[in-house]
Image: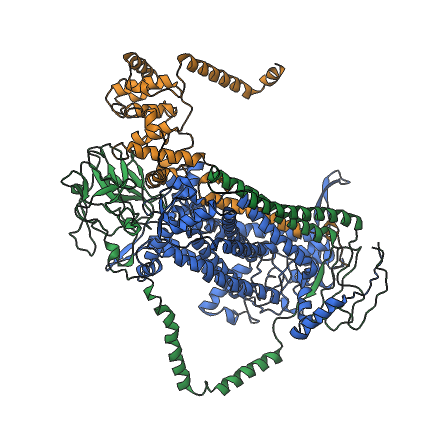
């Protein structure tokens, strides 16, 4: 245990310890409630009144300050009536909500609530007036999906913001399309269904659930596949390639040229007489 | 290094340098007299231009070992390259195609890199640490020719010109010129059949009254009831043209669904030469708060498709031209000069979204005949 | 060590016989010997052009490999190959065969990647080489022709790279071709015709990959080969320039002989270039077209950028305002014409006429075989840096969306800033660079006069402290002092002997030239006072060479390239 005390004087260690404790506590809690992050979506469809009550309470504590007591919205936040359970699951599940500070874009963060709490809030918001439900495991299953069709759909409708590789990209006024590296298949589905923030909505009658599964399959395979040509360079296209050509290519060759042409010490000290 | 004590002999066919003089080792920093112009006829030098031996034989011997090691390494790497080529299958015969390619590329590339770099490093060691260091000087000769040579040259030219009679016979000269110019134009003429003339083809697209809007990719027609979520956007193409890139390059459209009251499309007429009565934008061209705009940017033709449903801005990711979807895709920012053309849409008897007509102005980038 | 006695060198009989047979036929002994003994100056910046040369050779080698497998056809196929992720996708034969090269041809991906990296390094090396030539004044007489040939190769290289980038017909390159089509359409009067002839009709048509291909693999490489040959021939014929230094004059070349030294060095460098490109091709993935997807005019990717050498044009297209004119039934697309074509033309025109402008302004008609240090030509260096900043801002703006995301700066703000910076930046860069150059010249002059600060602090008898200084060595002085040109230069003076403006300075043209001349020459070579310098310098064994530089400094405050009365220097053939 000496190594702990030895490090305790370091200021960062305190934060690390607190973080560790919090993570441990959260894991225990999740285990105790019996609902991990892989919890089933049936929570949303078969929502009990107790779940709605729990959600209402959580909403009142964490969300109502911006979205209003009855989720009717305010000057700083939209109404959630009709937003649907899928939107809640996406926003809270990706840690974007509750918002810490108002910025151009809500960044992805570790979620504040457990999955069961998220389902409770989702059930409450869904009870206020419809909206898309949380997709089931079957909805987001990519078994048998066509990555080829997914590719066509992705490039025509998603790549303009998220980049061909899902690396993300810039929008106006400081907003950005996030990279698709962390989103789960359910979250990708929910994002298409609900159009979080600046993202347009792709409802199920326009992009059918099968279309969505094709897109998800394409995204997942793209991000998981290796880079056969070496390091990916961020998969953002020629800009980083140009940097590497200059810094790596020209840089290395200039060093080689300097070595080849450098004067040796005895040459340097040679006198002209 | 001790066996080069033999006396220096300069035979008649001796190819000894004698223009500039080097100092032999061990005075290593050698710099010769710059030489004054043509030194070719100076007396032969008593010493060689460049020395034969490294002043530090011990160090040279050590470096020789290093270089030999590197050359051997290179040879081994080349063998490795062949082995990797033969030994590593690619394609999807055994397992994942990407992983197989990764393995092959890594093995082949590493072997090739080592083979090349080892030779390169070894050669630099050879020339820098094994060979005797030299620095020599070579005289430059004036580039300009002697005046006599120039005069003789000019004379030759003039003689030839006179003999050719061209200076005296303008008829010959001018008709020859007249003959050559059309010949030079011929290569341009034969390029004519590279493509058809543009005509008015850039002014129109395949959209016409009743053409259904179909979702790109799934090729399904779409009803306002399908496309009923405010904030929705989708890329659509004219039905039946999914495989025709030339058509799609002009006719691709995005449709956007808005909340009631958000669309504020003005009634806008063309004020150009096409006559003042050509309608360019109208609320009557929308269906149920669904509006259709050309996806082809009016700057240089990239698909302008980056739609922010919160601000209703359409951004082109190529050069960031920004259009306001609420007000007829008017330009908010960037290099695009004109709004994205609006496609008049309505619903057909079966309830599907269809075009009322073609676009009322040319889509895409500016061109000379656009007007 | 051994004494300086040497054996006579004896050619082995068989070799001598073979050599004799060859010489009987080609009369080559003398010429080849001269070539073998050609002296190459040893300075690392002189290898920048070689990076380009060797990249070009590697481009040809890898390119030949790729042509064996690539199918330059736009006929449509539905993919059912090894890369199953794209199974069933509609694509062109060109794209499908590129997938095939990447995933089904052993070494194909490596060749593709080396080819692409070599293209990037080729153009980057050309840019470095060009900047080195510019900033050291190596393009001056007699090398103006080679400067122009180099610019021609640079232009061709850009087009060649763009065409190659377009070959696989993937989404990124197709977008680039689409932009090129938009630019073509913007050309007044003939734009639509050019576009229709190039694409065989409306974009994208079924022709352009095949047409680009033949230009890419035959026409431009052929032109480049011819120009490379001319470039190298002129370089050998006119001999290298060299950096200023001890013993280096306008009448000699100091360095190492071609045979065997330089031949080994340059051979080694070829392997270095190949090795580095192979390393990049192994470990840095470039243009992963299987991720990008096939081209379709319907789709677009965020962060659509061209390869870096087109980046400045992409940037200028992004920052230029949306000006167009509709006049008399015609549209003039200034928003496309100026950023894409006028700026490209402007850059290359300025570069092309620069040697002649400088020559006109300075009145310097002499030969220059010793390069100038950038500080010794403040106006040129300032103009060069202004150009670099101008280019650089547009270049950065070509990646503004990536910069916006990663530095969290709003996109429009970047563009707005760039719109001003592209005008203000070069002016500031010019001014600052010029001041820095003149400051460095002053420091050089002070060093020549007072010596080098040694860092040793000595206490003086009166209790004060002073830093010990030592005189500059001849080698240091030779690097500091600029050599005058060897031949008689046209002496330009403001007034004639009667105090009237000199004939060359009368009239509008004369006055303009006089102003330009003054500006170019002003600040060049702030010479140290003649007295302090003569003592410290002329006596310490510098010999004839040193005398040249020394005299130049004496010629006074306006001693400059060609401006001082340097023609009377005893520098020509004795």
| B326 vs C307, nearest the viewer | C307
Please state, as top left, top right, bottom left or bottom right, where the N terminus of chain B lies in the image. Answer: bottom right
Q: Where residue C489 sits in the image (x, y, percent)?
A: 59, 69
Rendering colour mode:
by chain
Q: Identify the chain drawn in orange.
A: A
| Chain corresponding to green in the figure | B
Q: Is residue C378 visible?
A: no
Residue at the farthest front position: B93
- Residue B167 drawn above or below residue C204: below
Toward the viewer: B65 or A137? A137
Q: Out of A65 and B96, give the one closest to the viewer.
A: B96
User: Residue A266, how many percent across, how many down?
Assistant: 75, 51
Looking at the image, residue A254 sits to the left or right of residue B131; the answer is left
Q: Nearer the viewer, residue B90 or B322?
A: B90
Where C22 falls versus A73 (above or below)? below
Residue at left 23%, top 53%?
Answer: B204
- Please give the name of the residue rendered at 76% of the width and 68% of the height, measured from the top-left corner: C13
**Where does residue C552 sit, x and y in percent of width and height?**
65, 62
Give the residue furthest to the left.
B349
Chain letter of the blue region:
C
| Left or right for B146, reference A120 | right
Asked which quadrant contains residue A206, the reply is: top left
- Above or below residue A191? Residue C4 is below
Q: In which quarter of the view is residue C412 placed?
A: top left
Considering the image in quadrants, where does the C terminus of chain B appear?
bottom left
Q: Position of residue B200 (x, y in %)?
A: 24, 58
Using the rendered image of the protein, determine whether residue A92 is visible from the camera's viewpoint.
Answer: yes
Total labels drawn? 0
């Amino acid at each position: 245990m000496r190594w702990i005390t030895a490090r305790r004087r370091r200021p960062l260690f305190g934060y690390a310890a607190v973080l560790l404790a919090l993570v441990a506590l959260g894991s225990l809690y999740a285990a105790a409630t019996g609902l991990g992050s892989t919890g089933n979506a049936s929570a949303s469809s078969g929502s009990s009144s107790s779940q709605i009550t729990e959600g209402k309470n959580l909403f009142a504590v964490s969300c109502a300050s911006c979205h209003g007591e009855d989720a009717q919205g305010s000057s700083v936040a939209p109404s959630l009536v009709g937003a649907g359970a899928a939107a809640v699951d996406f926003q809270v599940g990706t840690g974007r909500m509750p918002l810490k500070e108002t910025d151009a874009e809500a960044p992805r963060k570790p979620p504040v609530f457990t999955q069961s709490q998220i389902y409770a809030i989702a059930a409450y918001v869904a009870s206020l007036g419809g909206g898309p439900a949380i997709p089931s495991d079957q909805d987001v299953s990519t078994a048998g999906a066509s990555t080829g069709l997914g590719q066509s759909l992705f490039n025509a409708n998603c790549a303009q913001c998220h980049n061909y590789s899902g690396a993300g990209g810039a929008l106006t006024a400081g907003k950005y399309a996030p990279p698709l590296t962390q989103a789960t298949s359910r979250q990708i589905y929910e994002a298409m269904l609900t159009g979080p923030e600046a993202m347009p909505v792709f409802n199920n009658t326009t992009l059918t659930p099968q279309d969505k599964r094709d897109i998800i399959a394409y995204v997942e395979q793209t991000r998981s596949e290796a880079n056969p040509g070496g390091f990916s360079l961020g998969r953002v296209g020629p800009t980083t390639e140009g940097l590497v050509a200059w810094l790596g290519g020209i840089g290395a060759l200039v060093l080689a040229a300097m070595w080849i042409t450098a004067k040796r010490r005895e040459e340097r000290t040679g006198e002209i007489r | 290094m001790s066996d080069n004590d033999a006396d220096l002999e300069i035979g008649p066919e001796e190819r000894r340098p004698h223009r500039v003089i080097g100092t032999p080792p061990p005075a290593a920093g050698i710099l010769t007299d710059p030489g004054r112009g043509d030194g070719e006829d100076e007396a032969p030098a008593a010493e060689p231009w460049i020395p034969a031996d490294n002043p530090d034989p011990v160090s040279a011997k050590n470096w020789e070992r290093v270089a030999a090691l590197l050359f051997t390494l290179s040879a081994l790497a080349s063998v490795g390259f062949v082995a990797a080529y033969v030994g590593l299958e690619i394609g999807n015969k055994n397992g994942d195609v990407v992983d197989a390619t990764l393995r092959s590329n890594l093995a082949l590339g590493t072997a090739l890199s080592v083979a090349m770099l080892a030779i390169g490093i070894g050669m630099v060691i050879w020339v820098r640490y094994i060979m005797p260091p030299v620095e020599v000087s070579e005289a430059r000769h004036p580039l300009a020719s002697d005046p006599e040579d120039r005069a003789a040259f000019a004379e030759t030219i003039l003689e030839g010109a006179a003999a050719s009679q061209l200076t005296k016979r303008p008829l010959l000269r001018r008709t020859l010129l007249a003959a050559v110019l059309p010949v030079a134009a011929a290569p341009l003429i034969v390029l004519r059949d590279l493509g058809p003339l543009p005509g008015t083809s850039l002014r129109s697209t395949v959209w016409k009254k009743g053409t259904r809007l179909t979702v790109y990719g799934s090729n399904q027609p779409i009803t306002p009831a399908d496309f009923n979520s405010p904030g929705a956007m989708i890329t659509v193409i004219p039905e039946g043209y999914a495989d025709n890139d030339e058509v799609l390059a002009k006719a691709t459209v995005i449709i956007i669904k808005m909340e009631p009251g958000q669309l504020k499309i003005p009634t806008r007429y063309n004020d150009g030469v096409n006559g003042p009565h050509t309608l360019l934008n109208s609320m009557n061209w929308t269906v149920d708060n669904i509006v259709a705009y050309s996806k082809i940017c009016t700057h240089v033709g990239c698909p302008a498709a980056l739609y922010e449903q919160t601000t209703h801005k359409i951004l082109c990711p190529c050069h960031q031209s920004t259009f306001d979807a609420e007000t007829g895709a008017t330009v908010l920012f960037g290099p695009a000069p004109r709004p994205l053309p609006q496609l008049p849409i309505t619903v057909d008897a079966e309830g599907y979204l269809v075009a009322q007509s073609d676009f009322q102005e040319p889509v895409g980038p500016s061109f000379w005949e656009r007007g | 060590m051994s004494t300086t006695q040497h054996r006579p060198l004896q050619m082995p009989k068989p070799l001598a016989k073979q050599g004799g047979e060859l010489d009987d036929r080609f009369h080559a002994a003398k010429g080849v010997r001269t070539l073998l003994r050609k002296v190459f100056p040893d300075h690392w910046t002189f290898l920048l052009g070689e990076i380009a040369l060797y990249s070009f050779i590697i481009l040809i080698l890898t390119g030949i490999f790729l042509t064996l497998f690539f199918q330059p056809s736009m006929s449509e196929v539905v993919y059912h190959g090894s890369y199953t992720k794209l199974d069933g996708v509609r694509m062109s034969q060109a794209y499908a065969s590129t997938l095939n090269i990447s995933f089904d041809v052993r070494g194909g991906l490596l060749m593709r990647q080396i080819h692409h990296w070599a293209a990037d390094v080729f153009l980057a090396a050309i840019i470095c080489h060009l900047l080195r030539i510019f900033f050291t004044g190596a393009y001056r007489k007699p090398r103006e022709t080679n400067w122009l040939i180099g610019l021609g190769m640079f232009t061709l290289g850009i087009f060649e790279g763009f065409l190659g980038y377009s070959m696989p017909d993937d989404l990124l390159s197709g977008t680039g071709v689409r932009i090129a089509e938009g630019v073509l359409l913007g050309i007044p009067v003939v734009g639509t015709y050019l576009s229709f002839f190039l694409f065989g009709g409306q974009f994208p048509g079924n022709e352009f990959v095949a047409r680009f291909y033949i230009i890419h693999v035959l026409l431009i490489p052929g032109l480049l080969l011819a120009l490379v040959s001319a470039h190298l021939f002129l370089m050998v014929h006119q001999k290298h320039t060299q950096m200023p230094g001890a013993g280096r004059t306008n009448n000699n070349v100091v360095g190492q002989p071609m045979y065997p030294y330089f031949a080994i060095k340059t051979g080694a460098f070829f392997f270095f270039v190949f090795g580095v490109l192979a390393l990049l091709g192994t470990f840095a993935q470039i243009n992963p077209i299987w991720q990008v997807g096939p081209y379709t005019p319907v789709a677009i990717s965020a962060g659509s950028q061209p390869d870096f050498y087109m980046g400045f044009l992409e940037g200028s297209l992004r920052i230029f305002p949306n000006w167009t004119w509709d006049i008399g039934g015609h549209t003039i697309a200034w928003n496309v014409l100026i950023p894409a074509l006028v700026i490209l033309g402007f850059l290359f025109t300025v570069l092309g006429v620069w040697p002649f402008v400088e020559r006109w302004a300075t009145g310097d008609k002499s030969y220059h075989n010793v390069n100038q240090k950038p500080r010794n030509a403040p106006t040129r260096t300032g103009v060069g840096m202004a150009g670099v900043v101008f280019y650089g801002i547009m270049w950065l703006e070509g990646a503004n969306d990536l910069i916006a995301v990663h530095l969290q700066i709003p996109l429009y703000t970047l563009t707005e800033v760039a719109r001003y910076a592209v005008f203000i930046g070069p002016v500031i860069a010019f001014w600052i660079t010029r001041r820095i150059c003149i400051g460095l010249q002053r420091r050089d002059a002070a060093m020549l006069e007072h010596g080098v600060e040694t860092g040793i602090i000595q206490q003086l008898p009166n209790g004060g402290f002073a830093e010990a200084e030592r005189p500059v060595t001849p080698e240091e002085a030779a690097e500091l002092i600029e050599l005058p040109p060897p031949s008689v230069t046209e002496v330009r003076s403001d007034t004639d002997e009667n105090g009237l403006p000199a004939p060359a300075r009368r009239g509008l043209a004369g006055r303009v030239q006089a102003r330009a001349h003054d500006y170019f020459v002003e600040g060049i070579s702030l010479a140290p006072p003649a007295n302090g310098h003569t003592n410290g310098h002329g006596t310490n064994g510098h010999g004839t060479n040193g005398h040249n530089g020394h005299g130049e400094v004496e010629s006074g405050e306006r001693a400059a390239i060609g401006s001082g009365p340097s023609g009377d220097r005893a520098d020509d053939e004795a």
